[in-house]
Amino acid sequence: MKISIIVPVYNTAGYIEQCVNSLLAQPIPDDDFEILLVNDGSTDQSLDVMQRFLIENPDIIEIIDTENGGQGHARNLALDVAQGDYIGFADSDDWVADDMYARLLGVAEESDADIAVCNAYSVSGTEMTVMNARPQGTDISAAGSVWNKIFRRSLIGSIRFPEGVWYEDFAFSAKLLLLSQKTVFLDEPLYYYRASHPSTMRNQNAVKNLDILTVMDEVAAFAGEKGKDAVEFFIINHILVDAIKRVNLQNSLDKKKVIRTLRDYVKTHIPDLDACETYQAETRNRRIIMKLNYKGQENISQIILKAKSFL
């Protein structure tokens, strides 16, 4: 079997039909792909919708029913039974272009790549914004989401998503990008990310963002000394820019304390930002935001970032 597509599902009865239909539309022979739907303890009608798809497509769809354990747990269950040479992931409230997985599979097989990646659309109402898969032009800058990628199954091996924490996508994709001998990119948006739908990362729980520190420690241990530059890249981009920006936009009473903890972590690992070669390699605009956040001036960086084209 060429590809397995894993879809964790939790209370998305109103969206899952569009998601699964877009997966079934892929021009891939039935014998070459499977869709693994993981019902993560849904309390709405999600399981009923999945079972209908199973009845109509028994040779392609498999349902894994489990108690609620989070996306990481749901994906791990599916990884243990997936049969595809390549593995893809989709979120049940999103959808994909009708040929996304066929095209990713095609370029991966043609170039014998470990990972194939495409761009995505961020969809909010009627507005769609293109999300660049590797915003800084390097393979490791594609770390973050797993839903715009396919991974060679043999590359994944025993690597699994951390469970019970946020940023599990980052941990999984960062490790595999570090391992990949060849990663190829399609410079086209083929995945549709529903930004307007509530999700784990779009709420007011500031403290939970500290999970990124646990995840970053795990990635750093995995990378070892040879991956020091990559880990510094992850720290200044995913913590110093993204996590601090995300928390600073919240209304949580804990946000100042959380931002201080995030900043302290960065300073512990990078005590002299100006001397950090990874920081020096960033664009001027990114360095401005990083320096402001590093110095505790995240409110100023937030004002600057209101200009959408700044980064």
Image (cartoon, rainbow, N blue to C red):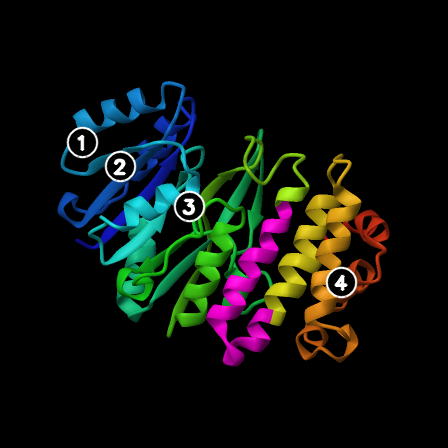
Identity, as a three-letter code, of the amino acid under mark 1: Asn
Q: Give the labeled residue for mark 4.
A: 290
Q: Is residue 227 magenta?
A: yes
- Relative depth, front residue between 44 and 87: 44
- Numbered mark located on residue 72 in the image: 3
Q: Residue at x 54, y 46 (%)?
A: 166
- Disc 3, disc 1: CB below 8 Å? no
Question: Mark 3 or 4, which is nearer the eye?
Answer: 3
Label 3 packing within 10 angstroms: few (<14), some (14-19), many (20+): many
- Disc 3, disc 2: CB below 8 Å? no
Q: Give the labeled residue for mark 1.
A: 57
Q: How many numbered circles are shown?
A: 4
Mark closest to the chain's N terminus, 3 or 1: 1
Mark closest to the chain's N terminus, 4 or 2: 2
Q: What's the magenta region?
A: 209-231
What secondary structure is the stretch in magenta mostly built from? helix
Q: Position of residue 64 (x, y in %)?
A: 26, 35
